[in-house]
């Protein structure tokens, strides 16, 4: 580990000694936990931002007009034959003559 945020080992040691003198040994562990929590939150936000940014870049690359034209003109990506896999519908059965119901007979 050569550096941590561009800070070398000697600088980290110097910061730790100054923090020990300023905060004292009883408050230093709590302050270290607080600082570690802040760094963890910063790292999580940073990684989420990076992943969101990467997704947006991929979407923009897919919408690039030059790429769309190249894909359309590329003979290896055009279908060579019709791949219609649907079957024709079966012929429907002939309709049966309507029968009169009992309700229609009683109404007449």
Image (cartoon, rainbow, N blue to C red):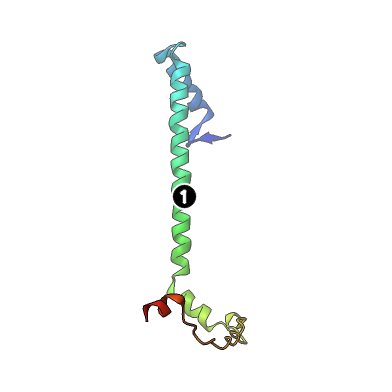
Whether residue 15 appears in this view of the structure is: no
Closer-to-camera residue (82/93)? 93
Whether residue 27 appears in this view of the structure is: yes
Q: Residue 86's quadrant in the figure? A: bottom right
Placement of 51 over or under 102, stated as above or below: above
Residue shown at 41% from the left, 14% from the top? 23
Q: Kindly state the secondary structure of the residue where label 1 is placed.
A: helix
Which residue corresponds to mark 1? 50
Question: Residue 81, image x and y in percent?
Answer: 62, 87
Q: Check the picture and name the quadrant holding the C terminus.
A: bottom left
In screen coordinates, is 76 left or right of 106?
right
Q: Check the picture and name the quadrant holding the N terminus.
A: top right
Placement of 60 over or under 103, stated as above or below: above
Closer-to-camera residue (98/37)? 98
Residue shown at 47% from the left, 40% from the top? 44
Question: Residue 99, image x and y in percent?
Answer: 49, 83
Residue shown at 51% from the left, 23% from the top? 13
Residue shown at 47% from the left, 39% from the top? 43
């Amino acid at each position: 580990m050569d550096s941590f945020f561009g800070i070398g080992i000697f600088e980290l040691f110097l910061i730790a000694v100054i923090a020990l003198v300023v905060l004292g040994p009883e408050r230093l562990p709590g302050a270290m936990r607080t600082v570690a929590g802040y760094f963890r939150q910063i790292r999580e936000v940073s990684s989420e931002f990076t992943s969101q940014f990467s997704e947006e870049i991929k979407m923009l690359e897919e919408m690039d007009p030059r790429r769309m034209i190249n894909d359309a003109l590329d003979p290896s990506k055009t279908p060579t034959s019709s791949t219609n896999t649907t079957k024709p519908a079966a012929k429907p059965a002939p309709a049966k003559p309507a029968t009169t119901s009992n309700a229609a007979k009683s109404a007449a």
